Amino acid sequence: MLCTFSRVVGNKQWLFETHSSRVIHGSVTGLRCIHARATEFLQNNNQDWTDSQKTIREAITKICSRFPEEYWVIRDETKEFPHELHKALAQDGWLGICMPTKYGGSNLGIAEAAVMMQTISESGGGMTAASSVHMNIFGLEPVVKFGTHEQKQQWLVPLIAGKEKACFGVTEPNTGLDTLRLQSYARRDGDHYVLSGQKIWISTAQNAQKILILVRTTPLNEVKKPSHGLSLFYTDIDPSVVEITEIPKMGRAAVDSNSLFFDNWRVPAWHLIGQENEGFKMILHGMNAERILIAAEALGLGYAALRRAAIYANERRVFGQLIGKNQAIQHPLADSWMKLEAARLVVYHAARLYDQGHTGGEYANAAKYLAAEAAFESCERAILVHGGMGYAREYHVERYLREVFIPRIAPVSRDMICNYIGERILGLPKSY
Ligand SMILES: Cc1cc2nc3c(=O)[nH]c(=O)nc-3n(C[C@H](O)[C@H](O)[C@H](O)COP(=O)(O)OP(=O)(O)OC[C@H]3O[C@@H](n4cnc5c(N)ncnc54)[C@H](O)[C@@H]3O)c2cc1C
């Protein structure tokens, strides 16, 4: 039996039509966009998710529904950091999802954090929304694992409470993906280290008070292996010494990306995490987690694009019929759903393994690769399904496409993932 009902999503009243218990389509009064079926707004029916994952999905959905797509369009235009989302997540304790309870966190796993990040992105906030909290979720993993009690107390508590934001400084302009050859240097001077060098692409540096930064403390020619001699610091970004220049870019305008230049930057010695020269080992602990979370964020964008594409295809009439009736429209979308679901299974498999203590990178890398590619294809197809309207801001899919390049490029490229799988899993020779 067909019936209609209304529901508030974001700050709008939505009208839905249902068949039995299933939503078949819904529409915002006066607008053409609708939420429906497998494209139902942030559905929570994945059979493979645990109760705790479903609870997180529901809670994050509630928060995100206060930030409708219009909010993200405005942020994209004004380039203002989405402090409101950061604050809302902090207020309800979500920034500490993976942090120890002793310091205000919830001590849940990456499998739960992945649901949170997928949902944030899938709500329509995309990489802008996800990146505004991304670093705070997993980034301080080296502090959690290797920091002293004093460091955790001083650093984790304000981060979880949303009073401080952190950024992550690894990439350098001259060395790129060849992290082990990075050139920024720190020398010990009494109870301080003195840092000099540069970083590039550092997300949120304009808005963060703190930075987790990887620099060399022993020259490359004095170490047995290039992975030795790097050290990790968590410290205040001192704008009087650190020159921060924003990089104009393609998408995610509201979350800044920056070049950092610093010379004679005095950092208290107690800001060193763990042992001097052991920084790379420590940073590896966070890398698999980051790949899984980025993969989940990519998935979110892929599903958001698919949702919009299916809704539009079920509504737009050309040649006297719905465009979704054409298999040239319908089949690529079906194909994208299957690819996103396949990627999703790998993402949550990788997350479960990580939470069980698996340290290998094969599934985390595969998850990042597969999710980013499936999401990219879904975003591209969503534009094509919308025809000319795919190019208009109004339908959001052009914003999704601009943002979905990020998980394809960062934190590691597709090529480097293939190198990893080729060498580590297939036993093929290293090519570089
Ligand atoms: C929006 C955005 C946000 C980011 N945020 C941060 C951040 O917060 N902190 C941070 O530290 N970094 C950040 N990054 C940096 C990001 O991690 C790097 O851009 C990424 O790791 C690639 O490095 P690169 O740009 O120097 O590419 P390069 O190393 O110059 O590589 C260029 C191309 O060459 C290919 N290539 C290089 N070597 C090989 C090889 N041996 N085999 C096959 N292909 C190869 C790469 O795959 C790539 O396609 C961000 C980047 C972006 C775009």
Image (tube, grey):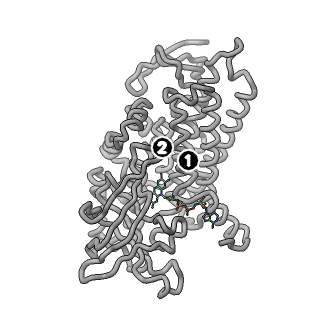
Q: What residue type is labelled 1?
A: Phe
Q: Residues within 10 Å of mark 1 (few under 14, many from 20)?
A: some
State which quadrant residue 7 falls in.
Answer: top left
With respect to residue 8, does 99 lie above or below? below
Visible residue check, residue 98 = no
Residue 188 at x, y percent in the picture: 31, 82
Name the residue that disc number 2 marks.
251
Tell whether circle 1 marks a residue whose Cβ is less than 8 angstroms from ligand 1: yes
Q: How many numbered marks are there?
A: 2
For the residues labelled 2 and 1, say whether their Cβ atoms are less than 8 Å apart.
yes
Residue 388 at x, y percent in the picture: 60, 26
Lower sequence index among marks 2 and 1: 2
What is the spatial separation of the Cα atoms under label 2 and label 1, in whole angstroms? 9 Å
Q: In which quarter of the image is the N terminus?
A: top right
Question: For numbered disc 2, what is the local secondary structure?
Answer: loop
Q: What residue type is labelled 2?
A: Gly
Question: For numbered disc 1, what is the local secondary structure?
Answer: helix
Name the residue that disc number 1 marks.
405
